[in-house]
Amino acid sequence: MESIDRTAQNIEKIGALFPNCITETKDEYGKSKKAINFDLLRQMLSGDVIGGAKKPMNLPG
């Protein structure tokens, strides 16, 4: 039985929504694999992304 590669599945899902954010890279064996260009994805979502430098809101509870 082969295990499910959830990372590859998630990359495929993101690629279906944002195909220009998918790039290829080499794994540790020199085989090409898909990867996400997070800088480009961040640019595409820039109006809807909260930057990491901001402090989180303090919510009661």
Image (cartoon, helix red, strand yellow):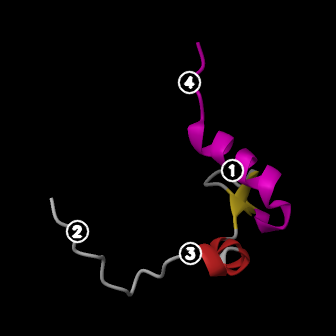
What is the three-letter code of the residue carrying label 2?
Answer: Leu
Instruction: Residue 59: give its label.
Output: 2
Instruction: Residue 3: give its label.
Output: 4
Label whose residue precedes the other's in the sequence (2 or 3): 3
How many angstroms separate mark 2 from mark 1 (CA)? 33 Å
How many angstroms separate mark 3 from mark 1 (CA)? 19 Å
What is the three-letter code of the residue carrying label 3?
Answer: Val
- The quadrant in which the C terminus is found is bottom left
Per the image, label 3 sits on a secondary structure element best described as: loop
What is the three-letter code of the residue carrying label 4?
Answer: Ser
Per the image, label 2 sits on a secondary structure element best described as: loop
- Within 10 Å of disc 4 (Cα), the crowding (few <14, some 14-19, many 20+) is few
How many angstroms separate mark 2 from mark 3 (CA)? 20 Å
User: Which residue extends farthest front?
Assistant: 60
How many angstroms separate mark 3 from mark 4 (CA)? 32 Å
Instruction: Residue 11: give its label.
Output: 1
Instruction: Residue 49: give its label.
Output: 3
